[in-house]
Image (cartoon, rainbow, N blue to C red):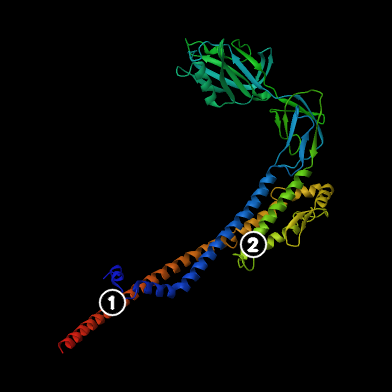
Amino acid sequence: MAIESIAKTMGSGSGIDISALVNGLVDAQFAAKSAALSKKSDTLTAQISAAGALKSAISGFDTALKSLIKTGSLATAPVSANTGIVKATALTTSAVSGLPAQVEVRQLAQSQVSSSTPIADKAAAIGTGKLTLTFGTAEVTDGAMTSFAAGAAASVDIDINSSNNSLTGIAAAINAKKAGITASILTDSQGSRLVLKSATGASQAFTLAATEDAGAEGLAALNVGVGATGTTIGSAAQSAVIAVDGVALQRSTNSVLDLIPGVRLDLVSASVGTKVTIEAQAPTAAIGQAVSDVVDTYNELLATLKTATDPVTGPLKSDPAAKALLSSLRNLSTKELIGDPDDNLVSTLSELGVATNRDGTLRVDAVRLATAIANDGASAEAIFKSGKGLSAALSFISTEASSMTYGLGYSVIRYNEAKSDLAEQQEKASIAADSMRTRMTAQFAGMDAAVAAYKSTQSFLTNQVAAWNSNN
């Protein structure tokens, strides 16, 4: 008989709720073990959550500091006295030096730009043959090229046939070559023009010469060069001329990276005779704000870590990785962050104005911070240098804490494995309880059947005695 059928008929003989009795006995038998397994499962869940949260928090702290340093706002930056002539920005890959400097922009770099005579229909066939593009240096007067000297680069041939011999097709063919000029079409009421533009720099002047197929004249109207009559040069190729502290040099673009170490100069306009001062500006305010942000983030992380490792209630009170992280953080403010061969005034966060409270949290001593930056600004900057100083120290702590071999990463693995084992134990306990419930249900069903038989016999005998008494 199936357990469901037994359960439905139980108690009919004895009058006892056998199903409730069995469930109560089984639950009592496994209650302690079930509660212990459930409590252990809750503990593991809390440990996994806490370890993951700490791992994410220290990693986020490290990433945020790296991102802040990467902006360059914590390093000495160049500042231009006249951004309408020249802008100065720091190159993040180099240290700024050689400042202050006097910069004079005598000439901006330009591209050569040529345009053809207007054509009524840009889709109409022009001619077929070949266009040859040659780069070099040129002289231009009143829109006409008066001289040209070819450079060392090889000329580029552009084939024009019946499939691309319209103004639109020719522009596409030139662009497809990616040879150093861009072609576009400008249209107004007079018609469409083929406009060609080179990169900036004196050596980027170009000529375009047509070799026409027999009986297919028309391409020559697009010639660019000495003696060309079908095109006009609106802008001549030229290099920038810039003088730094009186020394004049040429550059092919208006973004100059190699004149002042660590500084990018963007030339905005030419102003012969105007000298613009480029000075170094110390990041005093930015470093002060960075120190404050580091302290705030540190205190938030420390609070989370102390809660997780509380010796009474902390889910990670016995976790070695969490304890190691707590120890590393507590030593961070006094850790030597930069080399100190010359007895620098500032080499630790403590010397930079970060004080430690009795409860282990940090605070910023504003007066000491300002004094430290004023007296040893170079060392204060070095503490926040990319890949070194505080960034390197915090990165090391984060890597150690996140390690999958011995850090919090490994703790999460261990806790998950323990929870998996616990799930198996819970499943085995559930199977054992179900087995016991089935066995006891069968046993009590047999007892109930026996009681029912005894009751039947008792009833028979009672009736029999009653009949005997009646006959007497």
Residue at x 37%, y 74% (from the top left corner): 21
Q: Residue furthest bottom?
A: 472
Q: Amino acid at mark 2?
A: Thr
How far across and how far down the image is residue 128, in percent?
48, 15
Q: In the depicted view, which residue is nearer to us: 391 or 219?
A: 391
Say whether residue 337 is left or right of residue 200: right
What is the crowding at mark 2: few (fewer than 14 residues within 10 Å), some, or many (at least 20)?
Answer: some
* Residue 306 position by quadrant: bottom right
How far across and how far down the image is residue 93, in percent?
70, 42
Say whether residue 392 is left or right of residue 176: right
How far across and how far down the image is residue 134, in percent?
60, 21
**Residue matched to label 2:** 307
How far across and how far down the image is residue 150, in percent?
64, 21
Tell me the mark number nearer the camera, choosing from 2 and 1: 1
Q: Is residue 303 above or below residue 93?
A: below
Judging from the image, what secondary structure is the residue with disc 1 in?
Answer: loop
What is the crowding at mark 1: few (fewer than 14 residues within 10 Å), some, or many (at least 20)?
Answer: some
- One can see residue 384 in this view: no
**Residue matched to label 1:** 13
Q: Is residue 256 above or below residue 181?
A: below
* Residue 72 position by quadrant: top right
Distance from the alpha carbon under mark 2 to that under mark 1: 60 Å
Residue at x 71%, y 52% (from the top left corner): 296
The quarter of the image holding the C terminus is bottom left
Which callout, 2 or 1, points at the residue further toward the start of the chain?
1
